[in-house]
Image: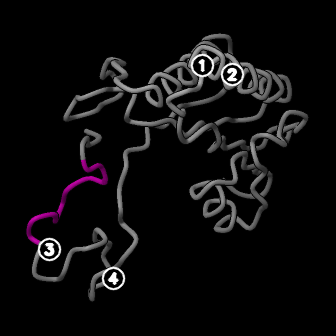
Amino acid sequence: MSGDTTIIGAGWIGRHLATSLGVTAIPQREAIDVVPPSGGSLVIAGGRSSVAAGDDLSAVVEEECSALSAILDRAHQVGCRVVVLGSSDVCGSAEVITGSTPVDPLTHYARLKAARERVVIDAIEGGLNGVVARVAPGTWARQSADRSPRPIGTTESDRGAWRGRPFGWFHHVG
């Protein structure tokens, strides 16, 4: 990805990805009229990061999926490659997640992400050039003395406990 890349989602991941690519992240709520670059790339790192206990889940899902669908339709019309960042939470309590791990969401957040994933899959089946990446949680914000990433709160002496482990704490992507 370079040059003609648009990032929708101005949360932690979207902002950092945009900064690394030298572009500006667009908050999803402001992206309803964004036209992705023709022949370029669109990364969607947006969507609610939580669903409040009092929120009507079906209304939240409808709002999120409708906005996502409109963005994907415009991307398809202009021939834009789309990467949607999803969540490994859609796989419930699965310890290992692969591209074929069934969807089994256990929380409102996971149900919302699963519904968004379904919108993307439907768009791909309709001809969109896109993919969903199920991002697993991680805390790899620090580096060890040898410059390799290590989880926050670990020391050089606990390296053996996490060396070679994938990013997820509850899941890992196989």
Provide the secondary structure element on which disc 4 rests. loop
Q: Disc 4 and disc 1: Cα gap in Å? A: 45 Å
Q: x, y (%) of residue 75? A: 79, 29
Q: Earlier in the sequence, mark 3 or mark 2?
A: 2
* Residue holding disc 1: 56
Provide the secondary structure element on which disc 1 rests. loop
* Residue holding disc 3: 159
Circle nearer the viewer, 3 or 1 = 1
Q: Disc 3 and disc 4: Cα gap in Å? A: 13 Å
- At a point 72% along the width and 43% down the height, the residue shown is 41
* Residue holding disc 4: 147
Q: How is the image coloured?
A: one colour
User: Which residue ends up furthest to the front in the rendered image?
Assistant: 54
* Residue holding disc 2: 128
Toward which corner of the image does residue 110 lie, by quadrant? top left
Query: Which residues, given as a range, are shown in magenta?
Result: 160-169
Circle nearer the viewer, 4 or 1 = 1
Q: Earlier in the sequence, mark 2 or mark 4?
A: 2
